Amino acid sequence: GIIMRLSYAELKKKIAGIIPKGIDYEIDLEAGSISVITKQPERFVTSTDNLTVKIAKQVKRRIVIRPHPDILCDEKEVHNAVNDIMPPEAEIRKIWLDPALSEVILECDNPSEAVGPKGVNIQSLRDKIGWLVKVVRAPSIESRTQHDIRRYRKEMSDERKSLLRKFGTRIYRTKRPGEPWVRITALGSYREVGRAMHLITTNESKVLVDCGAKPTSNKNEIQPFFSAPELMPLDNLDAIVITHAHVDHIAMLPVLFRYGYRGPVYCTPPTRDLMTLLQIDYVKVSQAEGNEPPYSKADIQECIKHVVDVNWGEKTDIAPDVKMTMENAGHILGSSSVYMNIGEGNDEHKILFSGDIKYEKSWLFDAATVRFPKVDTLVVESTYGGPQDIQPTRDAASHELQEMIIDVIGRGGKIFCPVFAVGRSQEVMIAIDELFKSGKVSPVTVWLDGMISEATAIHASHPNFLNRDLRKKLLKGGEHNPFHSKWFKTVESYQQRESILLDPTPCIVLATSGMMTGGPIVEYFKHWAPEPNNTLCFVGYQASGTLGSRLRDGHSSVPLVDKGQTLMVEVRCSMRKIDGFSGHSDRNQLMDYVSALNPTPRKIICHHGDAQTCNAFRQGLREKFRVQTYAPANLETLRLL
Ligand code: ZN
């Protein structure tokens, strides 16, 4: 049926009709959600009234309840009340206030003790302090990034509150007359891997998906197509949605803030944390290489201020005619497929951006979700979409890893793996941990160099985004927590790295960057590649144009720039490639993913693969599913409705 869009005034009227007389409340906007600000929050959340659910059903919007500022205690009183009410067995570690959301977060070792039977402790605390209370388990490793983001958000809470209202008001602007239409413009990652950016334009709004960099030595190809006229002026952009925190999807996002974008960025909380970490690193790496970074730390902070957290499964309005839901994509921590519902009634068009997907359960994540309502257009990644791109299973990969470690360490060599800080390194850590714990391989030190420890801490802070087995192990803690095992050691300083480089003891090193375009892995490579006993081991995708891909293709000596001088590195070490750790689906998994969508999408757009692969995958999809398939070039636009 046709649901007419309500104006803000009509919406308020409708809500007024639902809330019983005598309850005090105000209505406000919090980005895509309606917030009900009240001095009697208990009336909205108790099961007898169930007002929140009633309102949400009637107005078809997300509803959040926020206690009125008048009933909120100050910070000192909050701390005192927590000390009075929470039992010592709860082991409270930290108390975080988020004034923009009137929310107190309690980090503790025993959440069930903190919550109490039937939530009695939470309830009495809430009654005493007025704030909403959220209890989470204290992570086993503290993340610096998450700490900084929480502190920054607290400092900026007034500004954030008004920003969220501004985002919300824009969503409720009056409807434009005229025929509805939908287009997609390819602004990066089409017929290539890197610099993902897509623009959805409708008769009413503009939404951008992802904003990445390309890992390449060709300076002209690093940024996505910011110069495309469709993107300008940036004020016309309603929202940006981020699928996941890989450099090729997020590294250029702060550039938009540098050029004046001041709208919302929607992503999951782990994506928020990881992308901040990677963007800060992107600036550092650019400077270290003697390049002018495309943005500053201030631009990154501006970006954090504009992030709106969205959890999986929460349907959120992001533009007057666009609702969006994110679901697990199985690729890296917090990675999501983005489902967009555009327009209404007979003129509805539903787009699914797969994002990067792994359609198989991995050591870290569940398989990508395929339970979506009808999809009209699918925009799908094609990294391993070629007919030859069949990968071994996780078990086979683990077995290969086992044999390699026994072999190399046995002859006194060292293993060094280029890894992405996010995703692959944690997968490989868990695989190695299993081999060591099971006794299949005798343990050696595994050095983690370049942001891997911080990225791992962010994983430990978001257990709800991991698969059930791993979540359980993390929650049990101690020796069960694979990230905590004694063989994993972090390289803390330049001096420590120097001593590892010169130490003859066999060991394993996991270091960034994943395609050897920079970072500490290059140092290990310089020192260890000339030694025949050592092994350079690839566990992830190597895009063409990177040092990683040249080595994988068998170059026996490569030039490297070192302190302004070009240095030839002779490659005498052995090289191994273990494919089963990929966070991407192989050809079969991609086909299975499309098969599992029911009904089959009418249009399928392939991107995120080199030109040949995108085209081969497109052809394969057409033959199998008999639907319209496309592999457009960058800057092309397709009309979808
Ligand atoms: Zn990715």
Image: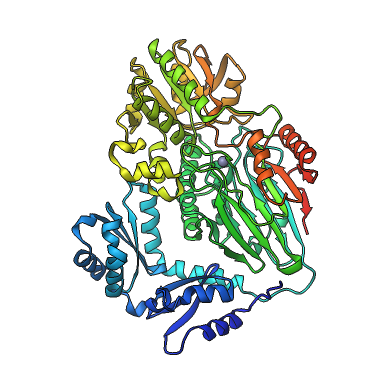
Quarter of the rendering occupied by the N terminus = bottom right
Question: In the rendered image, is residue 273 in sight?
Answer: yes
Q: Is there any visible trace of residue 563 in the rendered image? A: no
Residue 270 on image: x %, y %: 46, 50
Relative to 593, is 610 above or below?
above
Q: Is residue 42 above or below residue 395?
A: below
Q: As displayed, is residue 158 above or below residue 40?
A: above
Say how many tags the image has: 0
Tell me if 615 is positioned left or right of 419 in this view.
right
Left-right relation of 110 to 66: left
Q: Quadrant of residue 128?
A: bottom left
Q: Residue at x 57, y 20 (%)?
A: 551
Point out residue 225 in the picture as x, y percentages from the top left corner: 68, 47
Query: In this rendering, would 383 be left or right of 302?
Result: right
Residue 299 coordinates in the image, percent (x, y): 50, 54
Camera-nearest residue between 88 and 419: 88
Furthest residue toward bottom: 21
167 left or right of 398 in image: right
Q: Position of residue 156 (x, y in %)?
A: 41, 64
Where's the C terminus, which quadrant?
A: bottom right
- For the point 41% across and 33% down, the residue is 430
Q: Examine the image and state in which quarter residue 40 appears.
A: bottom left
Q: Taking 161 as reference, is 87 above or below it?
A: above
Question: Ligand 1 appears in which quadrant?
Answer: top right
